[in-house]
Image (cartoon, rainbow, N blue to C red):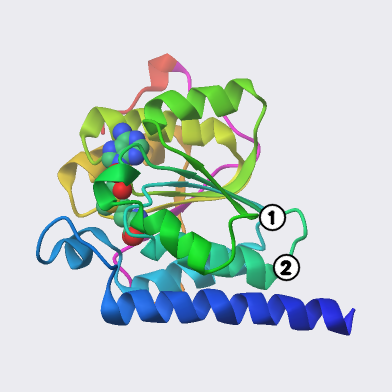
Amino acid sequence: MEWELKVDSDRVEKIRAVRRRLAADGPPRVRSDGDFERVSIPSSDGDALRDLLLAERPSTVIEIGLAYGSSALAVAEALVAFGSGQARHLIIDAYQNRFYGSGWSAIVEAGITGLCLLFEERSQIVLPRLLSDGFLADAAFVDGSHIFHNVFVDLFYIRELVRPGGLVILDDCNYPSVATAVRYFEVNTGWQPEPMPAATRLRAFRLPNPRTEPNFESFKPF
Ligand SMILES: C[S@@+](CC[C@H](N)C(=O)[O-])C[C@H]1O[C@@H](n2cnc3c(N)ncnc32)[C@H](O)[C@@H]1O
């Protein structure tokens, strides 16, 4: 048992080291100047994401939007620190090639390829497939396409893929496209804003348990 705990803390420390290095030096190659800082969640938001998930004690997390890997490493840190032997981290990123594979390289460097599974397709195509396969997650982090209809479709499927009572976390709710999509689920399907463990630009929502299906006649404009 002690040996197992030591192995886990070594794994956590390795992920932390890669997170620190990525935050300090950035990826080896970027699409353009300032792109890493523009698309990645800042390191403190990564800590908030990790802490939120740690409190959740999840085994399975779906993440949309890998880019250079900053948020994926924070999610993985929580999954490995919690130490469930069954942990799974499903990552969806249609355009990882545009980031020169940097996000996946960070995962390789952190030694967590056994934990993470990457789908290089549009999330709007992958999520319904996961649903029809009967997949169920404890939590999701949504930071993929920010186009309204794509976010709405992502959240439609995430609502069914995350277990009742689970957590949905989003970046960039300051964009009207993202905020409007999530507002539908808050106003019409009972998603409750979850208090954040620290000051962060991320927002989180607790799904109702049991899941409720709204009556179309009680639809509230959002
Ligand atoms: C803002 S970046 C994600 C940043 C990342 N979460 C982080 O903090 O390090 C958005 C990502 O979503 C991906 N993406 C955009 N549209 C997508 C879609 N329709 N399906 C899947 N991934 C998509 C992009 O390739 C990009 O990697």
On-image quarter of the N terminus = bottom right
Q: Which residues are magenta?
A: 199-215
Element on which disc 1 rests: loop
In the picture, measured across the screen, residue 161 lies left or right of residue 127, that is right
| Residue 35 in picture, x, y percent from top left | 16, 61
Where residue 122 appears, x then y in whole percent?
36, 30
Q: Residue furthest top?
A: 217
Which label belongs to residue 87?
1
Residue type beneath disc 1: Ala
From the viewer's perspective, is residue 115 above or below residue 118?
below
Q: Main secondary structure of the magenta part?
A: loop
Left or right position of 57 against 151? right
* Numbered label attached to residue 71: none
**Circles 1 and 2: CB distance less than 8 Å?**
yes
Q: Is residue 127 magenta?
A: no
Q: Quadrant of the C terminus?
A: top left
Give the residue number, with chain letter if any, for mark 2. 83
Vertical placement of 167 versus 219: above or below? below
Q: Which of these two is toward me, 109 or 115?
A: 109
Residue sitting nearer the eye, 178 or 222 = 178
| Residue 70 placement, left or right of 3 | left
